[in-house]
Amino acid sequence: MHRYLLHISYIGTTFRGIQKTVNKLEQSRLDTNSIQGCLELALRVFHPTNEIQTVLSSRTDAGVHALHSTVHVDLERPNGKPYDTTTLVGVLNRTLDKQRLPIRVLGSQLVADTFHCRYHATGRTYLYRFAVAKDPPAGDGENLRNRSYEAFVPVEEIDRCYFLQSHSFDIERVRAAARTFIGLHDFRTFMSVSRQKGPSRDHPMFTVRKIDEINIRPGKTLALATNATRAAETYDFWDIEIKAKSFLYKQVRRIVGALIALGNGRIDERSIYQMLTIPSKHSWDHRVELAPACGLYLCRVHYRSETN
């Protein structure tokens, strides 16, 4: 038996999420509405002698994408020898491509049988992409000011970025408030209620997390040619990058939602301060909307150099 670490990427739009659903009444049926289920189905082409069970390093919800995530899997070849990792990548990608699945294997490596892709990860970086419609130049007239910016979203950006219209969006105010989240905090207010129950979630320390970095930078459109020009003229694109060892359920989307609400002027800095310093589900400011899944990307799962 040999253990393999697979580096993967995917577009999550059409999936229920990365994690498969296990129905005890249907043990042999794979969940092909999840990235994990589709990957396990693709791994069957190697005909290992053991049951295929992938282990996830990170969980993403429906509609969330990944530029880099990882899973590990144990495979036992009939002759006992390890599979060639280059062949593993090539065959998996051909299989996924034939099924028209937006999942790609970036690389594969043999790891020790004691290695765990989740517990040995040293950190995770998430990227959130959003675009704010620019205010029309002064003197362009009332009709131009009231035009529907939502009418133009580059086709290349559909379900890849969050587009919003906001007069006088204050990105500098957002940058300043983002620094409030850096460091060790109880993020109970910024955790959505998960359907997965566990005794550890009732412990107060479960919601304590440390945010290592939050960087907000000008972004750019994924659109091409004429669409790119029009997108750049219509929207300001922004990237919010957040790095921590681990995150709570929907924590990133709640943080981003709060920052966008601040930039929009729906809430002020005091609201963010209260949500962060009074950790409770009752402290959530309901003027804040959860940032849509389409703009969120798992950007990187970090490991020590000897593993990565």
Image (cartoon, helix red, strand yellow):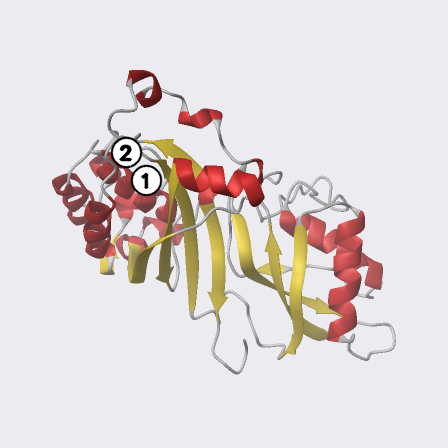
The quadrant where residue 259 appears: top left
Give the vertical position of 40 relative to 121 (above or below): above
Q: Quadrant of the N terminus?
A: bottom right
Specify whether 83 is left or right of 276.
right
Whether residue 52 can be seen here:
yes
Q: Is residue 138 above or below residue 118?
A: above
In the picture, measured across the screen, residue 269 lies left or right of residue 213, that is left
Badge 2 or badge 1: first in the primary sequence: 1
- Foreground residue among 171 and 7: 171
- Cα separation between marks 2 and 1: 6 Å
Q: Residue 39's quadrant in the figure? A: bottom right
- Badge 1 is on which residue? 257
Q: Is residue 128 above or below residue 8?
A: above
Would you say residue 51 is visible in this rendering?
Answer: no
- How many other residues sit within 10 Å of disc 2, few (<14), some (14-19) or many (≥20)? some
The outermost residue toward the front is 139
Q: Position of residue 10 (x, y in %)?
A: 61, 51
- Quadrant where the C terminus lies? bottom right
The amino acid type of the residue labelled 2 equals Val
